[in-house]
């Protein structure tokens, strides 16, 4: 729009850039990278696409890819950190680094602006466990928000699964007769199929959701991708709950800690979380193929009942 206001023709500018540099536009190669590599090679390609388009295509979209410099990259990463999202800056760097490595491999560029760029923020381990009062407040605020984000938060609390697994949920993965949710291997972090027993509360919640897409339970508006925009929704939820010192991943840790307090055995908690370490890691994990589905169901039902008690 600014180019038009200045009397410039954006299409002509793109053509001029192509002619001058003889290369591809950054946005064009991002699309090609997503279609030919990310969708086939990575389970989290939706998040990779979101980061590349939000953080980089929005700035460099019409630039020939050869013109992107380390200074340009540093400016984008610094802007992400300044808006209070240092972890997002790290993830954005990882995504664009993969894209440039792919571009070099396929002969689109000879060098990467990511070379020598360190992660903008030092990662810190988190041990935040929400109190019962905080958890009840988040649940109530999520209930008021409703579909889709509020329902996603409630399912995260009820199932203890990862955010991307919940947001990417497919209707075909749900079996309401057996009250199970089967996450295929390609959508789980460990890369193995995970069967999650659904508590009565989780089943009621899922059955109440609108079916706006034939495949996705939480589709993005007008698209065939899972819902996104979590930063905005999280800020809205924080305002409603009157608290901001927590992260969505803290819910998973809180559920695990809560089930432990309810005397759920550690190996059952690990099965619920679909962990590959701990008591079910290593050789024990290889030889112990017993699913513990009944025990997991009992644990999640017990947890659901506890949630009801703190919300009362």
Image (cartoon, rainbow, N blue to C red):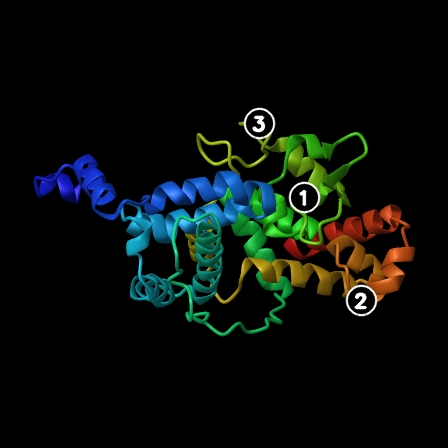
Task: Identify which residue is drawn at 84% across, 49% down.
Answer: 298
Q: Earlier in the sequence, mark 3 or mark 2?
A: 3
Q: Which of marks 2 and 1 is nearer the N terminus?
A: 1
Left or right placement of residue 268 versus residue 160 in this view: right
Q: Can residue 227 be seen in this view?
A: no
Q: Position of residue 277 (x, y in %)?
A: 77, 64
Q: Position of residue 107 (x, y in %)?
A: 43, 49
Foreground: disc 2 or disc 1: 1
Indicate the secondary structure of the residue bearing disc 2. helix
Q: Do the residues labelled 2 and 1 touch (CB within 8 Å)?
A: no
Q: Which of 283 and 195 is in front in this view?
A: 283
Indicate the secondary structure of the residue bearing disc 1. helix
Residue topped by disc 3: 211
Q: How many marks?
A: 3
Dividing the image into 4 quarters, which one contains the N terminus? Answer: top left
Crowding at mark 3 (Cα within 10 Å: few <14, some 14-19, many 20+) = few
Task: Identify which residue is drawn at 69% across, 36% down.
Answer: 204
Q: Which of 85 and 130 is in front in this view?
A: 85
Crowding at mark 1 (Cα within 10 Å: few <14, some 14-19, many 20+) = some
Measure the C-alpha gap from mark 1 to mark 3. Answer: 23 Å
Farthest residue, direction left: 7
Q: Which of 238 and 42 is in front in this view?
A: 42
Crowding at mark 2 (Cα within 10 Å: few <14, some 14-19, many 20+) = few
- From the viewer's perspective, is residue 27 above or below residue 241? above
- From the viewer's perspective, is residue 77 above or below residue 235? below
Residue topped by disc 2: 278
Residue 186 is tagged as: 1
Q: Do the residues labelled 1 and 3 touch (CB within 8 Å)?
A: no
Task: Identify which residue is drawn at 75% across, 54% down.
Answer: 274
């Amino acid at each position: 729009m600014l180019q038009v206001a200045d009397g410039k023709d954006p299409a002509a500018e793109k053509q001029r850039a192509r002619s001058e540099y003889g290369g591809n536009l950054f946005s064009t190669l991002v699309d090609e990278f997503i279609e030919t590599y990310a969708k086939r090679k990575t389970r989290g390609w939706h998040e990779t696409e979101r980061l590349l388009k939000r953080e980089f295509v929005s700035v460099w979209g019409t630039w020939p890819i050869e013109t992107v410099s380390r200074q340009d990259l540093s400016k984008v990463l610094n802007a992400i950190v300044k808006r209070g999202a240092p972890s997002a800056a790290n993830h954005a760097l990882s995504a664009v680094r993969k894209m440039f490595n792919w571009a070099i491999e396929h002969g689109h560029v000879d060098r990467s602006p990511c070379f020598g760029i360190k992660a903008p923020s030092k990662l810190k381990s988190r041990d935040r466990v929400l109190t019962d009062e905080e958890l009840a407040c988040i649940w109530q605020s999520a209930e008021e928000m409703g579909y889709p984000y509020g329902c996603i938060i409630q399912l995260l609390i009820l199932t203890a699964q990862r955010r991307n697994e919940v947001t990417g949920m497919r209707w075909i993965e749900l079996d309401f007769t057996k009250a199970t949710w089967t996450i295929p291997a390609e959508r789980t972090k460990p890369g193995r199929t995970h069967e999650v027993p659904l508590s009565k509360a989780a089943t009621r919640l899922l059955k109440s959701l609108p079916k706006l897409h034939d495949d996705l339970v939480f589709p993005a508006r007008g698209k065939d991708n899972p819902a996104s925009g979590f930063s905005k929704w999280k800020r809205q939820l924080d305002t409603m709950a009157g608290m901001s010192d927590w992260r969505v991943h803290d819910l998973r840790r809180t559920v695990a800690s809560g089930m432990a307090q309810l005397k759920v055995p550690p190996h059952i908690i690990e099965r619920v979380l679909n962990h590959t370490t701990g008591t079910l890691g290593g050789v024990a994990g290889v030889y112990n193929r017993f699913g513990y589905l009944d025990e997991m169901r009992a644990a999640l039902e017990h947890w659901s009942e506890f949630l009801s008690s703190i919300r009362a």
